[in-house]
Image (tube, grey):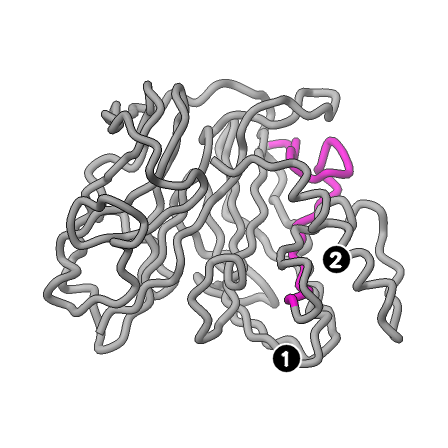
Amino acid sequence: MKSNCLYKIILYFLLIISLTACNNVRQETQETKEALTPFGHSSEDSLKIGFGVTSDKAISNKNFTFSMKSSEIFSPEITLINDNPDGNDFSLIFLLDYKQIPIITNKEKKLIVEKNLKPVSEEKFQISLPELTVGRHDFLALAIRNSEDINSDNIYMYRRGTIIVDQDKDVEISSSNLDSEKSTNLPEGVIFASKELPETINDSVINFTKDDVQNLYLNFHSVANRNYVILTFLNNNLINESIANPYISILESGNNHVPVTMPKRSLASYNELFFAIVENPYDRVEDDNGSLKTIPWDVNFSDKIIIK
């Protein structure tokens, strides 16, 4: 799925250029610059937003891998940047080992952290995670821009990291093999929902009623020999029971259609639903020296789906 290094490099420099062009130029540390995840497009009216997770526990300035002792608390610094003429509201959620967790910030325990950023502004704050067990953990932080926009490129930012407590050891995953259709009519890197098995991306649906959303399909194309975990979020809360086994393995290239069952009891009068697909869960993207490995490590998102 869209592991496009050139694309990420271009986006990175777009953010840095936008930062240095502002009247109020900020002197970022090199560590923060390395750990920012920008997104947007090359057009003049693109969003210029950054999201970072940094910690002195990082083994390199990329802040992809953190090493700590079991007697310590993982307390990274979160950075949100809004270099736009308009304010932006964000909801931040945090996952440990693909379970949504409460964090402590400003001495308060929160499952969702709400932030309002004024035009051309930046905010830094610290969070603390619950006590961690010995071994390897996957950490995922999401910053969700609250907007009427449904395009995933304009809504979701993420930072993914590996936390090693005392000693590193592989995590065993019980995955389900998913049979792919040997077809390439779905574009790689695009995730979408449909009411029935789709023939093309034109069968995607972004508006559901409570009745017809009970059973739907999540669709995406994958190359062979990939492992994923599929995450379902309803109103910014992770739903565990929507997919029988969220850990899947793809053996052959093709289109994939995952049945999703929405729990009716969870639906309000207005609901926002989205999916995230994480490549190679629990794999490390850095070795012990901080050098990057050549493995897919992206998190890809569906567009926002409205349920009424």
The picture quadrant where one finds residue 205 is bottom left
Residue that protrudes farthest toward the left in the picture: 211
Q: What is the tally of numbered marks visible in this picture?
A: 2
Q: Is residue 110 above or below residue 12?
A: below
Circle 1 packing at 10 Å, graded few (<14), some (14-19), many (20+), is: few
Q: Specify which label sits upstream in the sequence, 1 or 2.
A: 2
Q: Is 193 in front, or is 61?
A: 193
Q: Which residues are magenta?
A: 46-69
Residue 66: within the magenta?
yes
Cα separation, mark 1 vs mark 2, equals 17 Å
Q: Residue at x 88, y 68 (%)?
A: 25
Q: Residue at x 52, y 67 (%)?
A: 145
User: Where is mark 2, residue-wise?
Assistant: 15
Under tag 2, what secondary structure?
A: helix
Circle 2 packing at 10 Å, graded few (<14), some (14-19), many (20+), is: many
Q: Is 9 in front, or is 285?
A: 9
Judge left or right: residue 17 versus residue 308. Answer: right
Residue type at numbered disc 1: Gly
Q: Is residue 271 above or below residue 238?
A: below
Q: Residue at x 15, y 49 (%)?
A: 196
Residue 163: within the magenta?
no
Under tag 1, what secondary structure?
A: loop
User: Where is mark 1, residue-wise?
Assistant: 87
Q: Is 140 in front, or is 20?
A: 20
Which label lies toward us, 1 or 2?
Answer: 2
